[in-house]
Image (spheres, rainbow, N blue to C red):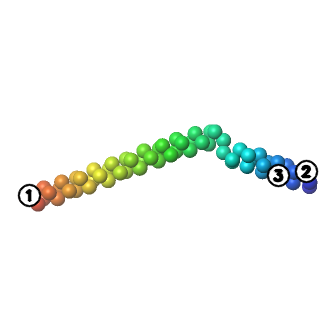
Amino acid sequence: MLDLFISFMVGLLVGVSTRFRDKDWEEQQKMYDARLQEQANSIEYYKKLTKNLVNENSELRRNV
């Protein structure tokens, strides 16, 4: 029973000392963040494009 407790504590301390993350996780997180930013930029672009098209369409309707 004591050996299980000691192994748990050693594992916990090793996990805390490595900050629960490794380099592969950090690289994956960077790639994930870059993809999210790219998607956010695309969404913002299409929002602006749609807004401009709606404004242009309303201007054309007013002129007719």
Q: Secondary structure at mark 2?
A: helix
Q: Nearer the viewer, mark 3 or mark 1?
A: 3
* Residue 63 numbered tag: 1
The x and y percentages for residue 13 are 78, 49
Residue nearest the viewer, comparing 17 with 40? 17
Residue type, mark 3 in image: Met
Q: Residue at x 73, y 46 (%)?
A: 17
* Residue 40 numbered tag: none
Answer left or right for 39 relative to 2: left
From the image, tell me which residue sits under label 3: 9
Local packing at callout 2 (Cα closer than 10 Å; few below 14, some 14-19, many 20+) is few
The x and y percentages for residue 11 are 79, 48
Local packing at callout 3 (Cα closer than 10 Å; few below 14, some 14-19, many 20+) is few
Residue type, mark 1 in image: Asn
In space, the residues marked 3 and 2 are separated at their CA atoms by 10 Å
Residue 18 image-quadrant placement = top right
Q: Residue at x 73, y 49 (%)?
A: 16
The x and y percentages for residue 49 are 27, 50
Q: Secondary structure at mark 3?
A: helix
From the image, tell me which residue sits under label 2: 3
In the rendered view, would you say 20 is above or below 54? Answer: above
Residue type, mark 2 in image: Asp
In space, the residues marked 2 and 1 are separated at their CA atoms by 84 Å
Badge 3 or badge 1: first in the primary sequence: 3
Answer left or right for 39 relative to 22: left
